[in-house]
Amino acid sequence: MVKIFDKCLTWCYSLLLALAASFTQNFDAVGFALLLAGGLVVADYMTGIVASLYEGKGIESHRLRWSFAKLMVYAVSLVATLATGVLLHLIEQVISPDVHRTNILLFTLACVKYEAYIIAWIETVSNIENARRIFSNNIFLKYIHWILSVEIVKKIPRFAEFLKEKREGK
């Protein structure tokens, strides 16, 4: 009975080490994407504060919560994508241990890269919107914003209203 328990414990320990190794080997892409998202969210936060002060508005706490919530959503989606890919890779390794390199990790890292592109695009547009609030007559900022902002949100029924912030009491 002790031998079976030892073998089971060894197998579980090996599986956890394989998971940790796969995760840490491929975390560089997610780490870079998290740094990119964090930097852009901080820049968005700072430009938003400057724009609010420039317009004579105060700093609102719901905006701060929104920035923090966006950063958490970005981080969770990136880490969850990597964790899912690593888990699928480990399942494939258990099913067919003779295959040493699979395309699952490459596909996972490609997904992380595209998620980082989407995060960068969203935050860049937000930063440009904040800059436009400060420099309202700048034609270059208007042109860049026009190029980067996709009006697809207006094409989706009821999605634009869903994205609008609703304040309590107003």
Image (tube, rainbow, N blue to C red):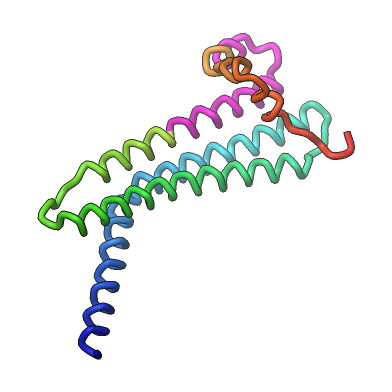
Left or right for 164, reference 5: right
Left or right for 77, reference 17: right
Where is the C terminus found, in terms of image quarters? top right
To which quarter of the image does residue 47 belong? top right
Residue visible at 32% across and 56% down in the picture: 23
Residue visible at 64% across and 19% down in the picture: 157
- From this viewpoint, which residue is outermost toward the front? 1
Could you tell me what secondary structure mostly forms the magenta stretch? helix
Where is the N terminus found, in terms of image quarters? bottom left
Identify which residue, 9 or 141, lies in the foreground.
9
Residue 123 lies in the magenta-colored region: yes
- From this viewpoint, which residue is outermost toward the right? 169
Q: How many marks?
A: 0
The relative height of residue 140 versus residue 47 in the rendered view (above or below) is above
Q: Position of residue 12 (x, y in %)?
A: 29, 72
The relative height of residue 62 versus residue 97 in the rendered view (above or below) is above
The relative height of residue 116 versus residue 4 in the rendered view (above or below) is above
Q: Position of residue 111 (x, y in %)?
A: 36, 37
Identify which residue, 97 or 24, lies in the foreground.
97
Identify which residue, 60 or 53, lies in the foreground.
60
To which quarter of the image does residue 132 belong? top right
Identify which residue, 38 or 18, lies in the foreground.
18
To which quarter of the image does residue 15 belong? bottom left
Left or right for 2, reference 64: left
Residue 61 lies in the magenta-colored region: no
Which stretch appears magenta?
Answer: 117-145
Q: Position of residue 92 (x, y in %)?
A: 23, 52
Left or right for 43, reference 105: right
Residue visible at 71% across and 36% down in the picture: 49
Residue visible at 60% across and 28% down in the picture: 127
Q: Position of residue 117 (x, y in %)?
A: 43, 31
- From this viewpoint, which residue is outermost toward the left? 98
